[in-house]
Image (spheres, rainbow, N blue to C red):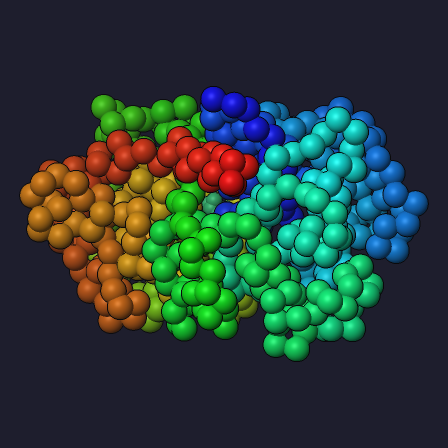
């Protein structure tokens, strides 16, 4: 096995900076790839959380004027991660989220902030740093969609580029007038370049110009070639279908390990699954729910956005409660949804508990204590919470879309009879079908031996990065050998 070097370029990386699943992926992949002879470094913007969390930073390059200010590249580490940090205070040293300011609006210079990240990645690929020549650049989501554009239009040789779509809904579209400022030539502004509906499309550029496109599940790779999930890019994706593939995400099975999780009250494994009862009791207490060991307790851990379908859950709550269930919801996002779940908790005390916010420890406690985890997404490129749920014995109840369809085995009669079922799927994604799925879940829960089988099948499913890493390694090698 020959060894290869790859540079991952992304706007988030766990554990330093995370707003969603993207960070989990970019944080876990480098370690998983080591077993396949791939040495992956990760380029990440120098947000305050990144600069504050890295170990042993060493300056390896400086730019006198980089997108309107001075900047440096720092080589650093964070646990097992081998990092390059783009320290450009004028672009990244700001409070809060990587994308939006305290007023919840996108930073007005996001076009420049992420063009800078992509430009730095492309230059590193082309030999900016002495003695470092990555064989592959791996760019993620719209923030780094310009990486292959910078490679292409520089006119200089560079490595092959893989571009991964984690979510097609965020496209990074900016006015044409910025073309010069982001350092791209006029020639780049064409149908087969970065042009997108009259402006500059960062995601579009990645899809158009990368050597290979991946997305995070086989089902989503198919769905995005159709008009419903394609979000305007389905035509381009169909054209490039031969270069497009779906590779499921895994989860970090050390971070998510119910037998050694320090964030949960009682650890357990398949042999000691009964200990989940203590976690359920603690969770009920934490969410102000009635202490009822035999009441079906649903958990939700989610961004509160249209994508996640939780407005449908609000619609079906009365029926769900009438069937005798409880809900513990952790999430943050759109104000009407936050308000909806806050109000529901007030209206149904003891039955519904809501925590609005982002809380990593509580996410673990929900996975360890809830009987079932609800993920009614309208679309879901991969989804990570259902993978964690499988590992923790919280039976996933999911919409049959994208990665949810690919990772949960529906408890239909055949799957139950053959002992392979791990959860409940519903389709089409409507409130009516969600309500039916809840009724079905209720019936499964009432049959405790079957329920226990669902839990154990889930807990013994391989949700690690082992298989996905093998697929990425194969893809990199194919590209390098091509
Ligand atoms: P997305 O990336 O679309 O938000 P994913 O399911 O792919 O959805 O990944 C979400 C990740 O963020 C999971 O690791 C999940 O546990 C975590 N997460 C989401 N919302 C919260 C929250 N409010 N508190 C803690 N963790 C959360």
Where is residue 370, by image quadrant? top left
Q: How many marks?
A: 0
Report the front residue among 216 and 37: 37
Residue placed at 65% from the left, 34% from the top?
A: 134
Task: Give the residue at the far front of this rendering.
Answer: 482
Direction from residue 171 to residue 313 in the image, left or right: left
At 7% from the left and 43% from the top, the residue drawn is 417
* Residue 462 at x, y percent in the picture: 32, 33
**Foreground residue, 436 or 115?**
115
Q: Is residue 144 visible?
A: no
Q: Position of residue 20 (x, y in %)?
A: 53, 50
Q: Is residue 121 above or below residue 304?
A: above
Q: Nearer the viewer, residue 136 or 351?
A: 136
428, 290: nearer the viewer: 428
Q: Toward which corner of the image does residue 181 lie, by quadrant?
A: bottom right
Q: Is residue 152 visible?
A: yes
């Amino acid at each position: 096995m020959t060894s290869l070097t790859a540079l991952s370029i992304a706007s988030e990386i766990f554990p330093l900076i995370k707003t969603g699943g993207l960070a989990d992926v970019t944080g876990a992949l480098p370690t998983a790839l080591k077993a396949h002879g791939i040495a992956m470094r990760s380029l990440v913007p120098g947000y305050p959380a990144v600069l504050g969390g890295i170990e042993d930073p060493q300056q390896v390059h400086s730019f006198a004027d980089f997108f309107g200010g001075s900047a440096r590249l720092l080589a650093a580490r964070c646990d097992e991660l081998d990092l390059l940090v783009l320290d450009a205070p004028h672009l990244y040293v700001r409070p809060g989220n990587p994308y939006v300011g305290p007023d919840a609006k996108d930073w007005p210079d996001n076009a420049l902030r992420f063009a800078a990240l992509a430009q730095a990645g492309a230059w590193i690929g082309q030999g900016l740093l002495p003695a470092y020549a990555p064989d592959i650049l791996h760019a993620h989501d719209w923030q780094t969609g310009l990486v292959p554009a910078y490679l292409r239009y520089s006119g200089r040789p560079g490595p092959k580029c893989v571009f991964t779509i984690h979510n097609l809904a965020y496209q990074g579209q900016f006015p044409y007038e910025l073309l010069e400022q982001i350092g791209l030539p006029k020639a780049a502004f064409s149908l087969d370049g970065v042009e997108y509906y009259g402006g500059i499309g960062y995601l579009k550029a990645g899809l158009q110009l990368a050597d290979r496109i991946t997305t995070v599940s086989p089902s989503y790779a198919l769905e995005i070639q159709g008009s419903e999930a394609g979000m305007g890019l389905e035509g381009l994706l169909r054209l490039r279908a031969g270069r497009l593939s779906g590779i499921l995400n895994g989860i970090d099975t050390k971070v998510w390990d119910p037998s050694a999780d320090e964030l949960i009250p009682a650890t357990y494994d398949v042999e000691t699954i009964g200990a989940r009862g203590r976690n359920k009791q603690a969770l009920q207490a934490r969410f102000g729910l009635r202490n009822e060991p035999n009441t079906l307790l649903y958990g939700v851990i989610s961004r509160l956005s249209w994508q996640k379908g939780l407005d449908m859950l609000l619609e079906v709550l009365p029926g769900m409660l009438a069937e005798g269930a409880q809900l513990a919801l952790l999430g943050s996002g759109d104000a009407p949804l936050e308000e909806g779940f806050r109000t529901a908790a007030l209206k149904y005390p003891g039955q519904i508990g809501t925590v609005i916010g982002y809380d990593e420890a509580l996410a673990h406690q929900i996975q360890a204590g809830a009987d079932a985890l609800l993920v009614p997404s309208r679309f879901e490129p991969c989804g990570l919470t259902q993978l964690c749920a499988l590992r923790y014995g919280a039976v996933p109840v999911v919409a049959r879309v994208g990665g949810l369809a690919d990772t949960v085995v529906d408890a239909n009669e055949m799957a139950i009879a053959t002992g392979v079922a791990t959860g409940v799927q519903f389709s089409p994604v409507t409130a009516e079908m969600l309500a039916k799925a809840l009724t079905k879940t209720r019936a499964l829960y009432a049959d405790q031996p079957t329920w226990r089988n669902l839990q154990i099948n889930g807990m013994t499913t391989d949700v690690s990065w082992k298989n996905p890493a093998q697929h990425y390694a194969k893809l990199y090698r194919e590209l390098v050998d091509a």
